[in-house]
Every structure is written in C-alpha cells, then in structure tokens.
Image: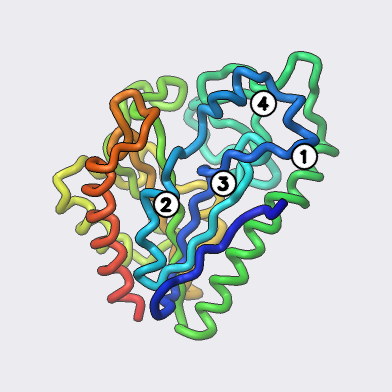
Amino acid sequence: MKIFKIIEPTTQVVPFVLSIPHCGTGIPDNLSALYQKSQLENLDDTDWFLDELYDFAPSLGITTIVPYYSRWVIDLNREPNNKSLYSDGRIITSLCPTTNFLGEDIYKRDYVLNQQEIEIRLTHYFNPYHNKINELLKDFKSKFNQAFFWDAHSIRRHVPSIHKNPFPDLIIGDNDSKSCDTKFTKITENELMKSGLQVNYNHPFKGGYLTRSKGNPSQHIHAIQLEMCKDLYMNHNETKYEEKKAAKIKKILKNTFQHLIESLI
C-alpha cells in the first residue's frame, strides 16, 4: 500500500505545499492485531475530515500531500529522535504513540513497542513523507526562488491533558518567527482575524516538527502550522462533518491562501 498521496494542482502551479499529516486512518495489516479493538474503532486523535475541508487547494495551484496511515502508526509531526517539542508539562504523544491524548493505552497489554520496531516505522512511513516534502520544496525554490509550506491540523476544543482551558478557534504557529518570514505570518494573521474568530499566535502551539524542520526563511522557504478546533467544521460533539460550518471556514482559508500566493509569485 502507498504511504501517502499527492493531490496535484488543477490550475497553474504555485510554490505552495499543503501537508495534512494527521488525517490518515490506515493501520498496516501486520500491526492491526496489536492494537486494542475499541481504540481502533475510534482513532480518537485523528484530524477528521481535514482533507475534505482543504479540498479547494488544488484549484489555487497548491500541491497537497496526505498520508494514508494513522498517526498511531507513527506521528509525522514529531522529532524522529523522539525529543519532546514542549517542556511545560503537557501530554505530548511520542513518535510512535502508545497512548492517546487522554492517556489511554492504545495497544494490547502484552505488546511492548521496542526501538527496532520504531526504526522500521521511521524507514517505511516517516522518512518517505518527509523526503517527498523536501523534494517538493526544493523543486519549487529552484523554479520560483522561494517556497511556502502550510501544515494543517485540527483538535478537540478542550483537551485538559494538553491545556487546562479550551483552545482558541485558530492557532498560528511559526516556531516563534523562526520558520517563516514575518511578512507571510502577518498576512496569515490579518486574513484569519478578519473572520472574527479568536486567533492566537504561537500559543499554546507554535508548530511541530514538520513546521520547524521545513521552514528556513534565510533560504526563502517559509513554514506555518495552523491548528483549528474541530467544532468549527464538525458538529458540537466533534464526530460529524457539517457542510454549512465547513463552508464558512473554507472561505476564510481560501481567502488567506490567495493572499499568501499573491505575495509568493
């Protein structure tokens, strides 16, 4: 089975890569028996329907990359050496998670995840995804002299194990201005704030490994992460996609992307 899919632009290509690393739901056949059945039925930490929310991107010339596999196989947005991205006491699931964000075990009790298995997953799932993004960004930079990377995420409105208070609607992360030129961050912030939604900057999320590893403003490669609450495009229980809600967010995101593209080309 393929590791990821590339959704090609349907119009003139722009130097913009959209990554949606946590919307995959696949579990390899050789691993599925290791997980608790009840956990696989929910896949609670999935960024549900986010690929559907961003399905307008190809019409803007954007190249999209989406994994087939669940973040429970390996988390594409974690440090490959499993170094924690934050040091404030919050629960951060590891490179190959053994619990969900609620702290519940996802594997059967008799299974112990070892380093050898982690290395296999790095080789088979993690590295190909990152290598493809690197390839796309390098190619765009050579053709357009700069490239832009947007890492898309969504989360439950309230996850006490991460943050004691409910999350704001939208959270822009650029690793404290290290992953993106402030020009592009300001465009993003200004356009999102026009929506009237609550927009935070680098708090409580400032971008994961994807944003931090891809963005290099001095080399004209810019990376931003956007975290959004699932209830902006799903029902109140965050279990079903809602077209009317999603249409409003799509319009906001599309407008933001259009302004970013105008500054890129």
Residue that carries the numbered disc 3 in the rendered image: 77
Residue 212, percent from left and from top? 52, 55
Task: In the rendered structure, find residue 98 and report the number of the disc placed on it.
Answer: 4
Q: Is residue 74 above or below residue 142?
A: above
Label 1, residues with CA under 10 Å away: few <14, some 14-19, many ≥20: some
Element type where label 1 sits in the image: helix
Label 4, residues with CA under 10 Å away: few <14, some 14-19, many ≥20: many
Mark 3 or mark 2: whose residue is earlier in sequence? 3
CA distance for labels 4 and 3: 16 Å
Residue that carries the numbered disc 1 in the rendered image: 118
Instruction: Tell me which corner region of the image, top left, top right, bottom left or bottom right, holds residue 164.
Output: top left
Q: Quarter of the image containing the C terminus?
A: bottom left
CA distance for labels 3 and 2: 11 Å
Instruction: Tell me which corner region of the image, top left, top right, bottom left or bottom right, holds residue 197.
Output: top left
Element type where label 2 sits in the image: strand
Element type where label 3 sits in the image: loop
Q: Are marks 1 and 2 in contact (CB under 8 Å)?
A: no
Residue at 85% of width from left, 38% of height from top?
Answer: 116
Amino acid at dot 4: Thr
Amino acid at dot 3: Asn
